[in-house]
Amino acid sequence: MTHNVWVVQRGEGFDFFPRWYGARVMLAGTNPYEIDILQEVTTTDGPVYVPDYFFYPAQVTYLLLPFWLLPWSVSISLWGGLLLIIAIALPLLITNRLQWRLSPLMLSLLTFISVFVFRHMMNVYVLGQFTSFILLCFVIAWWQISEGHPLPAALALLFATIRPESIIITAVILLDLLLNRRWKVVGWWSGLMGGLFLLSVFQIGFWIPQFISGFQVYSDEKGASYATDLLQIDILPVVLVVLVIGWGLWMYTQVRSLPDRWRVPWLLSIVIVVILLILPQTNNYTLVYLLLPLLFLTWLYRSQWWSLPLLFVILCSPWLFFAIDNFEVEQLITPLTIGGYLTAGWFTFKKQLLPSLRACFKSQSQEPDTERWANLRSMRWDIAA
């Protein structure tokens, strides 16, 4: 279906094509950062070829190797089909990790809204992008970290590093794991990433400077903008960036002591909001990352009917911004709104669940041994949830 509906009509007009072409060039021994990739784009005068760039970190060549070895039409068809499956699976996986018991009807409705009403998810499928795949990797990493499986968690975080902004999100998660003494996850990730990096250097040389300069060229030519560009007074963007980073650090100090099952989704939601507000975006494509905090907030506010309509409006809002053709406004307003909801949600979360934990251990005269304490604490959080 993907092949017949999209691939035949769009030719090579997918975000997947420059990566497919660049990875094949790299496998042949040529540096993909040094060449222009001619991509077919359909215009009113017919198909034309425009230059594009590989742009992604070199390890994507090895991480998604099977797709690069296949012919173009087969590769993009399978990739698009995978994206559609991911879009349908994400709500199920996230609600499962939140231990959110929904009726089949409600789960179907939530999935439909997440896949079709939340326009960004369908946009990923139509354009053959990478963001929903990365979001799936973060959800799997959350799952494996909370279950205590370091190697699968490290692999999921490794696959999450195929876009520039996702590298930063992954780095923050790894720093948190390091602070919480999850040595094995960080060790496995470092070893695997180090191996891929050395392999790429052996194949095309030290590519980091070219990757950084290519990122800058790509941002300039694609008209990248910051969410803060809407603020016309010169000092306001700087103030907003400082406030957003400060908010992110403060929120992390609040959630840092939570068990892995709850700290990781809080951290992911916080970092996603911060990254979307302070990094340049070429369009609203990366707003698909907001599906995780949106579903997390829907679960958090599930018993407060008055807040759910606004969350539903946020899920529907991409169509409104598309209609007025102003992604810059969406780029600023939507993450700010979700950041405000996360802040209010934290106080609700703390008020409802932290007292349950304290009550569980109030009668104990001394703290149990470390392993037993960790098990009991995790069990209390699961029961409270």
Image (cartoon, rainbow, N blue to C red):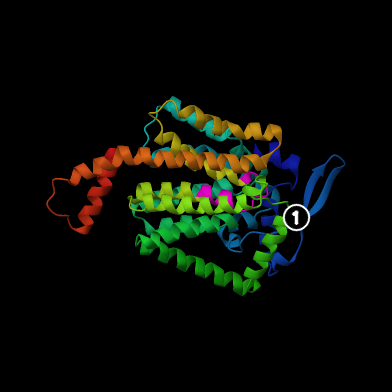
At a point 40% along the width and 30% down the height, the residue shown is 302
Q: Nearer the viewer, residue 266 or 198?
A: 266
At a point 42% along the width and 27% down the height, the residue shown is 104
Decide if residue 118 is on the left or right side of residue 351: right
User: Residue 43 at x, y = what percent?
Assistant: 83, 42
- Name the image quarter holding the N terminus: top right
Decide if residue 253 is on the left or right side of residue 138: left
Residue that protrudes farthest toward the right in the picture:
45
For mark 1, give the secondary structure.
helix
To which residue does mark 1 refer?
221
Q: Check disc 1: other Cα within 10 Å, few if <14, some if 14-19, many if 20+.
A: few
User: Residue 64 at x, y = what percent?
Assistant: 58, 56
Q: Amino acid at mark 1?
A: Glu
Instruction: Give residue 38's quadrant in the image.
Output: bottom right
Q: Nearer the viewer, residue 188 or 6?
A: 188
Decide if residue 373 is on the left or right side of residue 186: left
Q: Is residue 385 magenta?
A: no
Q: Is residue 274 magenta?
A: yes
At a point 24% along the width and 44% down the height, the residue shown is 357
User: Residue 60 at x, y = what percent?
Assistant: 59, 59
Q: Nearer the viewer, residue 52 or 23?
A: 52
At a point 80% along the width and 53% down the height, the residue shown is 50
Residue that protrudes farthest toward the left in the picture:
365
Instruction: Give residue 103's quadrant in the image.
Output: top left
The magenta stretch spans which residues?
272-285
